[in-house]
Structure formats: C-alpha cells, structure tokens
Image (cartoon, rainbow, N blue to C red):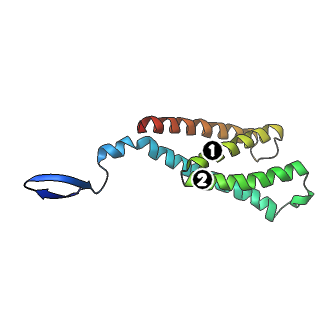
Amino acid sequence: MMKLGRAQDGDRSESIDLGPNSQQRQDDRWGFMLVVFMRVVAVLWLFQGLTHWKIILAPEVAPLDALPGHVAAAIVFFAVTDLLAAVGLWLAAAWGGVLWLFSACAGIIITLFMPDFQVGGLLMVLVSLCLIVVYFILTWNAAQERD
C-alpha cells in the first residue's frame, strides 16, 4: 500500500491511501460475493429474456398473434422484465434485485399455472426458489457486514 502525504516537521498529516488494505478487502467479502452472484444471475436472466424475444421475433411453431392471448401476453411480459432485470442485476442496483425478484416470482407462479410455459417446468421453479434464497442470504450478510 502506498501513502501520499505532506510531512511537516516529521508529522504525517492527511495521508491518502492509494488502494484498499487487506482488512478492508476482507470486510467487503459478502458484498463482493453478492455482486458476483447478481452478475451470474444477470447472465442467466439475459439468456432467458432473449429466449422470449426469439419466440416473438423468429417463431419456430406459430407466430405470436396465433398463440392464445394469455400465452402471448406472458411471453411479452417476460421478454421485457427479464431483460430489464438482467441489466439491473448486472449494474448491482437495488431496483435490479427488486425487478428480478418480481420477475422470478412471476415466473414461478406462471409455471405453476401453465407447466408447459417454460422449458424445465417444475425444475425451473426449484432453481428460481434456490436462487431467491441465496440472494436473500447474501443480501442479509452484506448488510450485516456494512453495519
């Protein structure tokens, strides 16, 4: 660690640290793990959002307007919210976490009512629930670390 400061009569006053010390890095461990987790989930949600946009822009089976109304609405909803949540998670913004929780909970609910909507069905529900639990644990520990 390098310190800069102006020495006057052997007294170092107002030194500036040019880099975090090892204690500060260790204290930010949970916050760092939370940011890494949010970025990994952001990549997953980005992929999921792009998958919904693929259904809208380049359908393999039927165009969006040929699908039942509730299915088309769900596809458009997740195409927008998944990408917005992915951006917010990547930025590690508080609104990104909230939007991701909203999108994940909506995905769980829609999968319970329409099991064929998402590939993986109940497995995706389990994965989403596990990710939500890990997110809350990391957020709790990062908040405790700051205090």
Q: Secondary structure at mark 2?
A: helix
Please determine whether, in this image, residue 114 is positioned above or below residue 85. above
140 horizontally vs 23: left or right: right
Query: Which amino acid type corresponds to the residue marked 1 in the rendered image?
Result: Val
Residue at left 22%, top 53%?
A: 14
Residue at left 79%, top 55%?
A: 76
* Residue 142, x across and y down, in percent: 46, 39
Residue at left 56%, top 40%?
A: 135
Looking at the image, is mark 1 or mark 2 earlier in the sequence?
2
Residue at left 45%, top 44%?
A: 31
Which residue is label 2 attached to? 88
Mark 1 and mark 2: Cα distance apart in space:
9 Å
* Residue 56, x across and y down, in percent: 81, 61
The residue at the far left in this view is: 9
Asked whether 44 or 138 is in front, the reply is: 138
73 horizontally vs 20: left or right: right
Viewer can see residue 124: yes
Query: Which amino acid type corresponds to the residue marked 2 in the rendered image?
Result: Gly
Which residue is label 1 attached to? 98
Viewer can see residue 62: no
Callout 1 touching callout 2 (CB < 8 Å):
yes
125 horizontally vs 113: left or right: left
Rendered-image quadrant of the C terminus: top left
* Residue 79, x across and y down, in percent: 74, 55
Q: Secondary structure at mark 1?
A: helix
**Quadrant location of residue 23?**
top left
146 horizontally vs 117: left or right: left
* Residue 113, x across and y down, in percent: 83, 38
